[in-house]
Image (spheres, grey):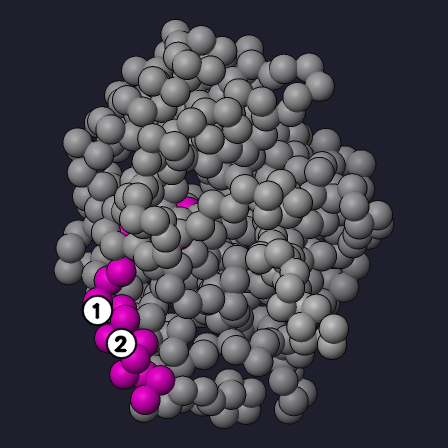
Amino acid sequence: MNDLSARAARPPYQSYWMPFTANRAFKQNPRLFASAKGMYYETPDGHRVLDGTAGLWCVNAGHGRDRIADAVANQIRTLDYASSFQLGHPIAFECADRVMALAPRGLDHVFFSNSGSEAVDSALKIALAYHRASGNAGRVRLVGRERSYHGVGFGGVSVGGISKHRVAYGNLLPYVDHLPATHDIAHQAYSRGDPEWGAHLADELLRIVNIHDASTIAAVIVEPVAGSTGVLPPPKGYLQRLREICDKHGILLIFDEVITGFGRVGAPFAAQRWGVLPDILTCAKGLTNGTFPMGGTLVSAKVYDTVTEAGTGGPELPHGYTYSGHPVACAAAIATMDIYRDEGLFERAAELSPYWEAAVHSLKGLPHVVDIRNSGLLAAVEFEPVPGKAGHYAQAVHNACFEQGVLARAVGECLVASPPLIIQREEIDRLFATVAECIRKI
């Protein structure tokens, strides 16, 4: 048998090494989607599945939007690719203007990349470049937070705080420290929206300042709402206190809004929802409605001007990607932002949030449930752990819901939901009624 025949004879699904997946288990029992429209996926055998996760926190405008498809197709026919290295194309500048029109006032420039991971690594490099350009090259320390997720680049994993994402890779970036997580079930269980307890945890940054000296710290990066660890809303006053401490000690504040950006919390960005302006803000996911890989790193004029004015004739920031500002990605992003504007989806998310909150908190008291959390159109149901069986109940509920035609995501001991912003009240009812039914059966 020749090599081609041998490969053809292998069982299906073997060639693709899937990300964040138990590959051997999946390939023994694959679950596939063949198409999607609106609020629903469809499997190859024709079963519809209500998407309670917006794909992977990203399909904010719902699936299969013709407006985006048409924009992408037209752009491919017009200008399929052009580099952004020492060259340009109009749609990238138009897209940047559109993003900045949505951004919090005080952020003035955007650096484009291809994902949230790249947006975060770009943010960290920009922060270091800013301090060097300011004459403070000794500011090299980066501060993340426990239970945080900042993508899979070496920078993002280093400042991230989910241990299982770190242990396989040994030493990561040096000069990294972490704030404590903001969630404490003993004080915050079943909080509706922002917990009352926990603002004082921001003062842990002062401990890090005292240990390392503020003059060595470049930036602090946090998710306003920690998503992938199980939806942890910020305690009331926490983000404001972080901003105060960073201002006092000359530390840049970075908001990772890859999940919370583009309407997820009822405003264009969480920075506007909580009234706290970061120096740098990352976004991705909802930027193109998940249709095309794209990320963005938004910066203040202070950061941009400091770096660019320190240049000596060549690129002031020696950083970028082959696909930065890709014309097709820009077309997808502009069409997506048109939909958000014309359908009022950010405002719709804010209006639906109280109904969403009531629906998820109706699960309180069900077997094995120990906490429920929500923020905007984000929610998590946390289950009691089972010794030796990490994520046992969450995975069981996820599997049972899928069999009932509803998609919610298991992360650790939590079941999380983050639907497209087009979700209807009856679909919210169905989502959580199915979750409740499946919890009772496990």
Name the quadrant containing residue 440. Answer: top left
Residue at 18% over, 38% down: 424
Please say if 403 is above or below 117.
Answer: above
Name the quadrant containing residue 196. Answer: top left
Residue type beneath disc 1: Arg
- In the image, 23: left or right of 399? right
Question: Which one is in front, 274 or 66?
Answer: 66
Residue at 45% over, 30% down: 398
Magenta stretch contains residue 74: yes
Residue type beneath disc 2: Ala
- What crowding class fits label 1: few (fewer than 14 Cα within 10 Å), some (14-19), or many (20 or more)? few
Residue at 32% over, 36% down: 405
User: Where residue 227 appears, x then y in whole percent?
Assistant: 49, 39
Question: Which one is in front, 358 or 8?
Answer: 8
The main secondary structure of the magenta stretch is helix
In the picture, the quarter occupied by the N terminus is bottom right
Write down the residue under mark 1. Answer: 67
Q: Mark 2 and 1 residues: CB-CB less than 8 Å, in contact?
A: yes
Please say if 192 is above or below 66.
Answer: above
Write down the residue under mark 2. Answer: 71
Question: Which one is in front, 390 or 255?
Answer: 390
User: Where residue 42 appears, x then y in whole percent?
Assistant: 31, 49
Name the quadrant containing residue 322. Answer: bottom right
Q: CA distance from mark 2 to mark 1?
A: 6 Å
Taking the view exactly as shown, the residue that stands out farthest to the right is 171
Task: For mark 2, give the secondary structure.
Answer: helix
- What crowding class fits label 2: few (fewer than 14 Cα within 10 Å), some (14-19), or many (20 or more)? some
Q: Which residues are magenta?
A: 57-77
User: Where residue 238 appears, x then y in whole percent?
Assistant: 50, 31
Residue at 61% over, 60% down: 16
- In the image, 344: left or right of 275? left
